[in-house]
Amino acid sequence: MEKDTFEYSVEQFADLQILRYRVPGFENLSLKQKKLVYYLSEAALEGRDILFDQNGCDNLQIRRMLEAVYIHFKGDRETASFKALEVYLKRVWFSSGIYHHYSCDKFLPGFSKDYLTDVLATIDEAFLPMKDGETLQEMCDKLFPLIFNPEIKSKRVNQADGEDLVVTSAANYYEGVTQEEAEAFYAARKEADDPLRPMMHGMNSRLVKKDGILQEEVWKVGGMYSAAIEKIIGWLEKAKDVAENEAQRKVIALLVEFYRSGDLKLFDDYSIAWLKDVESQVDFVNGFIESYGDPLGLKASWESIVNFKDLEATHRTETISANAQWFEDHSPVESRFKKEKVKGVSAKVITAAVLAGDLYPASAIGINLPNSNWIRSEHGSKSVTIGNLTDAYSKAARGNGFRQEFAYSDKEVELMDRYADITDDLHTDLHECLGHGSGKLLPGVDPDALKAYGSTVEEARADLFGLYYLPDAKLVELGLTPDAEAYKAEYYGYMMNGLMTQLVRIEPGCNIEEAHMRNRQLIARWALERGSADKVVEIVKVDGKSYVRVNDYVKLRVLFGELLAEIQRIKSEGDYEAARLLVEQYGVQVDAQLHTEVLERYRKLNLAPYKGFVNPVYTAVTDKEGHITDVTVSYDEGYAEQMLRYSRDYANL
């Protein structure tokens, strides 16, 4: 398939656009590497149901009920109600549940309870997902309030200051437990740890209260999610047999051991081994990784990505990581918060082969792991920028009119058209490769000291590190930016997004909940306020429309450096109160009037603020004896077609 004829856009509905991504270079992998990608991809897809259940205890039954209607309903499928049901199901697929994948708010259906009741009555009960002994009426009585009542379990993750974040969050990480009880439970666990090498307690379990006693339901073989984990292990064992080298074989073996035992010490061992494997071209993440879905930032959602190195593009990230010590030494933060010696920073640009779990359909464009602070300090980190996804985003966005509508003038549009592809990728590289790996905690500081604000502060720290260095002459010297003007494209785009355009992702009347969005508004609004005396940045009106105008890019960099220094201090000292004040003052509240204006202008463009992907399809070609002789890749599977196939072939829970 020729690149210039590739169809990136699949479909658009609600606030979502579905895209395709290409996997260039797959055909050049060896047969052994293709088999490795295939086995790891199957392992990735086997975990799909885990995330649905993590996002809400009734999500799987709701999904299966709606899928049964979608497949088996024989009535009029052209009515407004059925079309609304179809959109609702597509949103459930996209968000792995009934809560918006980004805002965490429950999204409500555009059809009525009566309509769904009538439709379900026409479906053979053999196709409906009633649990043992449950009648259709009992299933409806249980699920309908969740689906239709906005007041019942209204948020998957609640971050509202002053509320019990555990009790008011619908995510399936706790049952019968308060925030105070959960925090005390894990604080007690940490007391027995080596203070220099603490484990990530609670990462792979559900905390419940039974008969008045707090206990963990661990996600492992023989424990919670065992059926899915056993399938994942089966494919990992096949992958181990075709590993590229002994280092990669050890990584897979340790991950399998962790899945079997649930032992967090083994997860640390696996993370270290994964860090040390820098020679393999094919790589993967598979497991309980990011904690954004837990209001306390402890429990990790299940995710997977299978990828291989983009050898040409990786030169950029290798240049950055090779100079990591220079960047650390010249950071504007206090010297006592800097790492004396940056260790083990490896970085590469990758080509995603398959996305799964919390990276599907919506995906990050960069990843920096592991999350353990002591492992990062002693052993380093591995960073990736996902090149074929950023390419797909860029290609799909060309000519959509967004910049022309929201940028202050043609000068800013031309600036972004010329440089933004370069500086966006570079900012992601700096964020992932160096930002997350920079700085250090002071001795004795709890990695979880910032509690619910930890994720926002960490993302702000990494963003600011990248923003601070983008204008630096060092980047021109290293050949990473073409000239001293390029950084202005990222600065303008970042401020425009943080102050205005990311608001298209927020429902009217709502505050900002998601950590990355809080981070971006925090930085932009802090810089706007702190630079107001010199008018470094302004929001101005032209013909009744609001625009961001940057008047002094040099001073804006100074402001970014000042905020980076403060954010690093907060992180290093574990200053919870300072984190709370900073996030609540700048990152949460929305300017209602500006929000209304932005939504109206954006609506006229007929664009979707959120993007996600369908995966390519890998097919194993076998000979008469069943041996794999090749693995082919195709790109023609539709969104609903893929989701229904995954629900059929990977229904493990």
Image: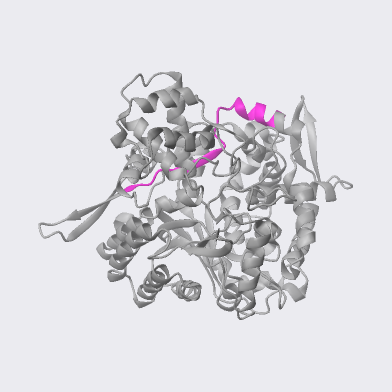
Q: Depth check: 5 or 137 in front?
A: 137
Above or below: residue 136 compared with residue 83: below
Measured from the top left, where is residue 368 in percent x and y?
A: 55, 63
Above or below: residue 287 compared with residue 637: below
Q: Depth check: 628 or 508 in front?
A: 508
> Is residue 398 shown to the viewer in this render?
no
Instruction: Determine if the magenta segment contains residue 610.
Output: yes
Q: Is residue 516 left or right of residue 334?
A: left
The residue drawn where x is 51% and y is 30% is 109
Q: Residue furthest right?
A: 533
Q: Residue furthest left?
A: 624
Q: Quadrant of residue 506?
A: top right
The residue drawn where x is 34% and y is 36% is 128
What color scheme is it?
A: one colour
Q: Residue furthest front?
A: 211
Image quadrant holding the N terminus, namely top left
Q: Quadrant of residue 40?
A: bottom left
Measured from the top left, where is residue 23 in percent x and y?
A: 37, 51
Measured from the top left, where is residue 200 in percent x and y?
A: 57, 69
Residues drawn in magenta: 597-617
> Is residue 416 shown to the viewer in this render?
yes
Instruction: Determine if the magenta segment contains residue 380.
Output: no
